[in-house]
Amino acid sequence: MQTDSIELGFLSIFALMTFFVFLIISKYSYKISGGVLMDDDFNKPQAFHQEIVSRSGGIASVICLLIFLGIYYLLYSQILYEYIFICSSLFFLGYLDDTKIKISPNIRLSLMVVFLIISINLFDIYISNVDLIFLNVWLENKVFFTIFILLCFLFIINGANLIDGFNGLLTINLIIINSVLLYVNLNNNHLEFSFFLTGQIIILISFLLFNFPSAKMFLGDSGSYLFGSLIALNTIITNNLNPSISSFFFCILLFYLFFEVFFSFIRKTYQKKSPVLPDNEHLHMLSYRIIKKSFKSENKNSINSFLINCVFSSLVLPSIFFANNSLVCKYWFFSLIFIYIMIYLRLYHLTKNQFDI
């Protein structure tokens, strides 16, 4: 009971501290490197803001994460090396883009692959429970094993970066995912990891206060890479800690993040576009076109994020009740693929003559 009180006290102090970190960074971010973090490019395919906004959310988030890792060490005498190395490496990779240091998408992807391969082998990152017999056999091969883990990271990290185009869209999605992971771990008495997940949720909620419904700061690539790597690691560790939970349940939970990337790759290849260059035909952009014509509110950006996450929650969260049933989770996962494609095609049909917004 005393330990619980100490942890609750640390979380309360951390929540207050996190809010002030974001407040200070948002207020003075224009002074960082001569204002290089200020996003004044309104012509990007995924730019929907009309005012200059700072891309300093990633900086505030990584500061808060490092503080919380220190708190975690004080309480449990553990240093989470894999989190520190992977998150800091990808944070700095994204930060280069936030500070307008131009790196081609191919070089950025190559650097990401190098960092992740080093991390996977250096920290022995593995997935212990896969609900496909043939895949479990293949994973016994070291090369295939590394490629599989690498692809998991790449899809999730780039998915986080891809949907981070509207106020609150990524952040709310990550809060939902982390909350479900927290529920799973608490249910199985993995209290130390649950404490770590709670700290991440606090950071996300603090950022959300400055990003939704109107944005005072953006995550930037540094922030989306940071949280993408966090959610990938969180899910892998939760999967390994809870072997009774179907691995397809975690696929359901991360469906929007990774399938958006996969579907975009297929779509762009079919359209003879570069798969690594951004465009304005993603699902969240198509839905925004519908909302822009349907709502008179000035917060169309935030309405879009809210509605997408409502649909996501309604399609994904009920699967919690079947998390231990591998067969149900498999059918649920493949049903989501069908539903996503049907929704996308419907939105595309409705907006096919409106791609000039």
Image (tube, rainbow, N blue to C red):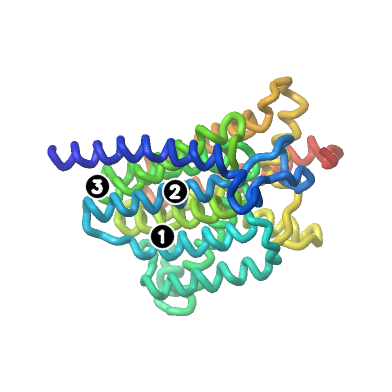
Relative side of 284 to 119, left or right: right
Q: What amino acid is at disc 3? A: Leu
Number of labels in the image equals 3
Q: Position of residue 19 (x, y in %)?
A: 43, 36
Of the numbered discs 2 and 1, the one sitting upstream in the chain is: 1
Q: Amino acid at mark 2?
A: Cys
Disc 1 element: loop
**Residue located 76% across and 43% down the image:** 42
Q: Are marks 2 and 1 in contact (CB under 8 Å)?
A: yes
Label 3: few (<14), some (14–19) or many (≥20) C-alpha neighbours in 10 Å: some
Mark 1 nearby-residue class (10 Å; few <14, some 14–19, many ≥20): some
For disc 3, the marked residue is 191
Disc 2 designates what residue? 329
* Mark nearer the N terminus (2 vs 3): 3
The span from disc 2 to disc 1 (Cα, nearest Å) is: 10 Å
Q: Which residue sits at x=66%, y=70%?
A: 107
Q: Looking at the rendering, in which quadrant would you find the N terminus?
A: top left
